Image (cartoon, helix red, strand yellow):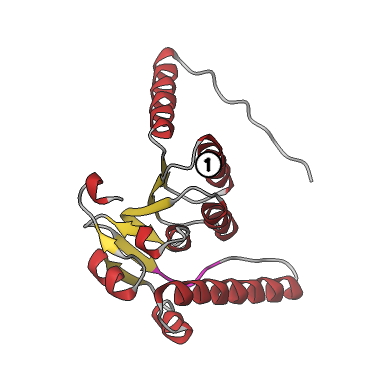
Amino acid sequence: MSKFILDAPECDDEDKDEKKKENGMASHLIKTRTIVITGQVDQEMAERVISQLIVLDTESKDPIKVFVTSQGGHVDSGYAIHDVLRYVDSEVFCIGAGWVASIAVPILLGARKKANRIALPNTRFLLHQPSGGAGGQLQDIRIEAQEILKIRQKINELISMETGQTVAKVAADSDRNFWMSAEEALQYGLISRIVSSAKDVK
């Protein structure tokens, strides 16, 4: 299979300044042991977040704050972030902000301690079924459908284990888009508390 590669256009001075500003902000966040997970979850995001987690964990064992505001995305990339959140020795606080949807929910559950899974007041949470698409031969479509069912079961079991809800309830709730406010997510067991100030994260 041939692939086409388009060279990126050269950046003008304004783009370079913007990039320098973004890099400076990212550098400052790392110095404060803060990671931001925002936007679509994909392989590039997973690589960035995993790299930051490993570097911070190597530098010291002070707590790491991870802000999660995402509509979800690629399941395997999300689970990679989830697993590394639990792999590092440093204490991790996962803080929901804006919206925490789809595979972003397991990412938030990556904080080992339930007490460290928190949300800002206006955060919304979304549970729903994983989706995918397959074309080609009937057997390939069948395999893809089976994989989606396995992924759905895996996510339901994780949410059940971490919230205390039954697998059957999680499956029924996520059969369609199931939105929760921060208060409802607290009652459901996705988070342990709602915070409105940085001094409350400890």
Query: Does residue 63 sit above or below 87 in this rendering?
Result: above
Q: Mark 1 — residue?
A: 57
Towards the viewer: 95 or 147: 95
Residue shown at the point (56%, 77%) measured from the top left: 153
Residue 70 in the figure: left or right of residue 122: right
- Taking the view exactly as shown, the residue that stands out farthest to the front is 61
Relative image position of residue 174 (x, y in whole percent): 42, 76
- In the rendered structure, does residue 111 fall within the stretch colored magenta? no
Query: Does residue 18 sit above or below 57 in this rendering?
Result: above
Residue shown at the point (44%, 26%) measured from the top left: 23
Relative image position of residue 140 (x, y in whole percent): 73, 70
Rendered image quadrant of residue 20: top left
Residue 66 in the figure: left or right of residue 118: right
Q: Main secondary structure of the magenta part?
A: loop
Callout 1: SS: helix
- Taking the view exactly as shown, the residue that stands out farthest to the right is 1
Residue shown at the point (48%, 42%) measured from the top left: 61
Q: In this picture, which residue range is highlighted in magenta?
A: 127-131
Towards the viewer: 107 or 89: 89
Relative image position of residue 71 (x, y in whole percent): 41, 56
Relative image position of residue 152 (x, y in whole percent): 54, 74
- In the rendered structure, does residue 128 fall within the stretch colored magenta? yes
Towards the viewer: 169 or 5: 169
Query: What kind of residue is marked 1?
Result: Asp
